[in-house]
Image: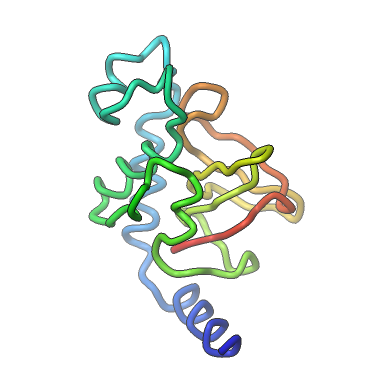
Amino acid sequence: MKVMVFLTAAFVALASPDISYAGMLNQAQKYAGLHEVKHNRKLRAVLGINPARTPWCGHFMGLIARMTGRKPPEGYGIARSWLRFGAPVRLAYARPGDVVVVRAGRGYHVGILAKMSQTRAQLIGGNQSGRVQFSYFSRGRVVAVRR
């Protein structure tokens, strides 16, 4: 079973087209800088929730997934639900545009991979310091990479 999961993950990582994944990264960048209070009206309109009162990283990811023709997981407003999105990818095969779930205190956070170094992942996502922005997370906090 583990071999099959590995082979599936390797196939997805190496053979799947980049179009929708890069598309997610490109779409997310269009919202960079929007703040949950300063740009509340615009974010409320596109997210369907009040980002100043609700954790919204998963809601932002749902918006971006739908904009690129992807189907968000059920319960997409909760970051942990993104553990069920797409197909699993080993961290070693992660590439820009992949969905990354990280530990955030006692909970989770989700964003889109922009770049990866030996020690950290740069993600763009919503609700990162109250806005859509690029932030760095230690590779050790990465729980899952999905494509």
Colour convention: rainbow
Placement of the C terminus among the 4 image quadrants: bottom left
Residue 60: percent from left, percent from top: 38, 37
Placement of the N terminus among the 4 image quadrants: bottom right
Look at 50% across and 69% down and name the residue there. 88
Residue 69: percent from left, percent from top: 23, 55
Say above or below: 12 vs 102: below
Say above or below: 109 vs 91: above
Look at 39% across and 54% down and name the residue there. 22
Towards the viewer: 30 or 108: 108
How many labels, in total? 0
| In this picture, residue 104 sits left or right of residue 98 | right
Write down the quadrant of residue 128 in the picture.
top right
| In this picture, residue 25 sits left or right of residue 63 | right
Residue 112: percent from left, percent from top: 48, 47
Residue 35: percent from left, percent from top: 44, 18
Look at 32% across and 58% down and name the residue there. 20
Towards the viewer: 39 or 107: 107
Write down the quadrant of residue 93 in the picture.
bottom right
Look at 58% across and 44% down and name the residue there. 108
Write down the quadrant of residue 91 in the picture.
bottom right
Q: Residue furthest top?
A: 38
Towards the viewer: 39 or 22: 39
